[in-house]
Amino acid sequence: MNNNPWIRSQEQLKAIAKKINLKPLLLARLLEPDRIITMSLPIKLDNGFVETFTGYRVQHNNILGPYKGGIRFHPNVSMDEVKALSFWMTIKCAVVDVPFGGGKGGITVNPKELSETELKKLTQVFAQRLSPIIGPTLDVPAPDVNTNPTIMSWIVDEYSKIVGKNSPAVITGKPVDKGGSLGRTEATGFGGGYVLLHALKKLKLDKKKEITVAVQGFGNVGYHVALFLAEHGFKVVAVSDSKEAIYVEKGLNPEKTYACKKNNAMLSNCFCVGNACDRTYGKTISNQELLELPVDILIPAALENVITVENANKVKAKIIVELANGPLTHEADEILDTKGIIVIPDILANAGGVCVSYYEWYQNMKKQHWTKEKVFTKLQKQMERVTDEVFTTQKKYGTNLRDAAYILAINRLQKGIK
Ligand code: NAD
């Protein structure tokens, strides 16, 4: 099967359609996005030259509510990637039972090569192009890879200027003082943690004393899941970023490691155990080696297609929790299935982010402010309920967890389609 994520997502859908009675109208609505937009984004750089970037917004489907999905700034962003991610958002919102549809956006850019002024200008031009097609009841973007609350606040400001009124509900993942929800930053990682804890109980695997974990990617999602799991007694032995991976046999302190990386910018200076960081506590490994470690749980939390036909046979983890979107190719998925490795699929595992995005949007629409405790209590309940539903669907249809999550989502969409 093709590793183009869009082709892959369509193939996934067609395979599910064959297993269940997917009605032709719903299949047609899911096979192509409702609307796709390509944007030309010229900006004047600090050196006076003009550079034109390309931006995208794909509105995949709004059967269950306004289009919803993040904005990614990355050199590999392409229309097909954005289309696939928007499709997965449609499915994810349906799995996790929030009243949103699916969308996604992005700019083909390496934001690390831009100054803050240039990045802000680029974001503002993007917001100008987006403004006719987004809105609190139309399309509500959010952060994704290389975008953050500050970038979201630039978009809200630009959008509010254009429509002539403060419109915080147009975007989620904002800074809290700009109408963001407490707990949104932690939501995807913590949500994955709630799903994993609940799944381990259901699989009767929660009794083991020391469960080892490796996390690929140490950004927003990777850091927060590592933090959550370390706080719940798991031993996080490896984490990585785009440059390198580190292995600490005794189990690392994610909070210290994250703070150390922020200061040093290199993970390999940050072998942190307990309250101390010392070079002798661990070793540097490659991202590839991290994926092949003999751990109980492997958590890809970086980019798509990192486990492929090339390395799937070398994976030794017993459970994979997909916090990145689409980290396994289809062939890798099949190999892992044959090996009896349990995969908790992205559309369930990383849905905590969109769940709290919904809480943020709801608070903005109703002019409410929830405490962090309320957010996490609701998030835990919702993630556990949908995990139960996915496991029940798995039993009913005799499938793996990914297919079960798809079937659950499609059944919800089928009820919503007019
Ligand atoms: P981020 O930009 O905060 O972090 C990405 C991390 O991945 C960084 O540590 C980066 O160094 C690392 N990375 C990049 N390329 C890599 C490579 N080739 N090998 C190893 N590591 C690499 O992004 P994020 O928000 O943490 O998102 C991570 C993943 O989670 C993405 O797939 C995203 O779509 C998905 N996701 C994010 C959210 C959210 O709320 N942020 C929600 C759902 C899904």
Image (cartoon, rainbow, N blue to C red):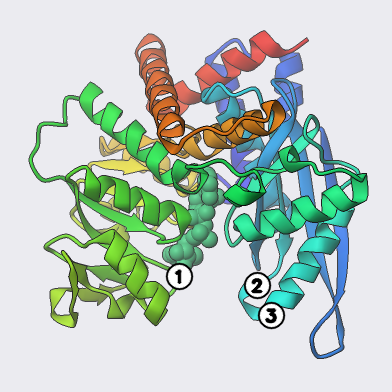
281 lies above or below 152: below
Disc 1 designates what residue? 242
- Measured as percent of width and height from the top left, residue 6 is found at 66, 44
What quarter of the picture does the C terminus occupy? Answer: top right
Residues 78 and 366: in front is 366
Mark 1 vs mark 2: which is more N-terminal? 2
Amino acid on which disc 3 is placed: Ser
Element type at mark 2: loop
Disc 2 designates what residue? 110
Residues 125 and 402: in front is 125
Question: Mark 3 or mark 1: which is in front?
Answer: 3
Q: Is residue 91 left or right of residue 154?
A: left
Residue at left offset 56%, top offset 40%: 181
The disc placed on residue 258 is none
The disc placed on residue 115 is 3
User: Splitting the image into 4 quarters, where does residue 266 fall?
Assistant: bottom left
